[in-house]
Image: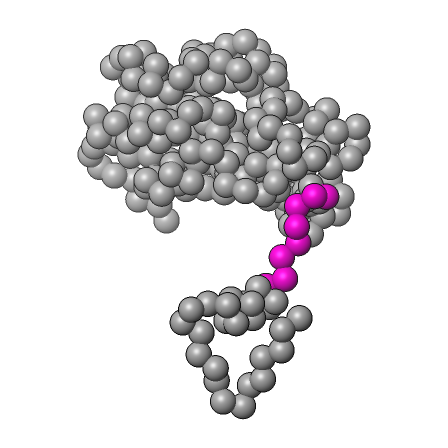
Amino acid sequence: MRVMPSQGGWIEVIVGSMFSGKSEELMRRLRRAQIARQSVAVFKPLLDNRYHATDVVSHDGTRLAARPVDTSMQILGMVGDADIVGIDVAQFFDEQVFEVAVRLDDDGKRVIVAALDMDFKNEPFGPIPHMLAVAEFVDKLQAICQVCGGPATRTQRLIAGRPAKPDEPVIRVGAQESYEPRCRQCHELPSARPSLDLAESALEGALEGPSAIARPGIEYVAR
């Protein structure tokens, strides 16, 4: 059971792959707050114009009025006396977005953030690791893998039906035409990304590290 703070502000973060329902969940929480007659301010990055120039819009068409901003610091000057601040697709913002969330939290506001936690290469996405670290509450949603039908936690970027190359920019605004959700097993990493043999890496570290100590009964053979 989740116990919400009785006073002061806090940060909630909703993460997951694309098509996992992050924006929909963000809007659900904000609408419940509006029903409770709480003042809500909603923001999204200016570059996210996939479905609408200003509104937050989920992939199923659910929408909520928002204010697009170019930088995260602009949010501080526009939030006014809102009780609750919603920030959608936060991974597209600059690194200061988590600092903005903390300042709003310190000011007694409830901050709800929706974002991708990993990019198309399965690497932490921009400022989101910092956001997760400072949040009081974190929810990770899953989509449905478009290959096997299992729970999807990864986002596959496709160019002409094939996995994107590793040198492509991390930020590329798109929807069904460029991305699909996949599970860990079905996600295809960019072909030029080297594979990692954990056993071999551990052995090489033991052989090359300055503090490596030979253990009796074990013969190390370089490969």
Residue 90 placement: quadrant: top left
Q: Which residue does the image show at 42% across and 69% down from the upper left?
A: 210
In the rendered image, the vertical position of residue 34 relative to residue 147, given as above or below: above
Where is residue 36? Give x, y as percent. 33, 22
Q: Is residue 46 left or right of residue 157?
A: left
Q: Which residue does the image show at 29% across and 40% down from the upper left?
A: 4
Where is residue 121? Give x, y as percent. 61, 40
Given residues 90 and 55, the one toward you in this image is 90
The quarter of the image holding the C terminus is bottom right
Judge whether residue 196 is colored magenta.
yes
Q: Main secondary structure of the magenta part?
A: loop
Where is residue 217? Give x, y as percent. 54, 90
Residue 152 placement: quadrant: top right
Where is residue 184? Give x, y as percent. 64, 50
Q: Is residue 133 left or right of residue 155?
A: left
Name the residue at the right extreme. Answer: 161
Judge whether residue 94 is colored magenta.
no
Question: In this orientation, does residue 68 appear?
Answer: yes
Given residues 86 and 207, the one toward you in this image is 207
Residue 13 placement: quadrant: top left
Residue numbers of the magenta segment: 191-198
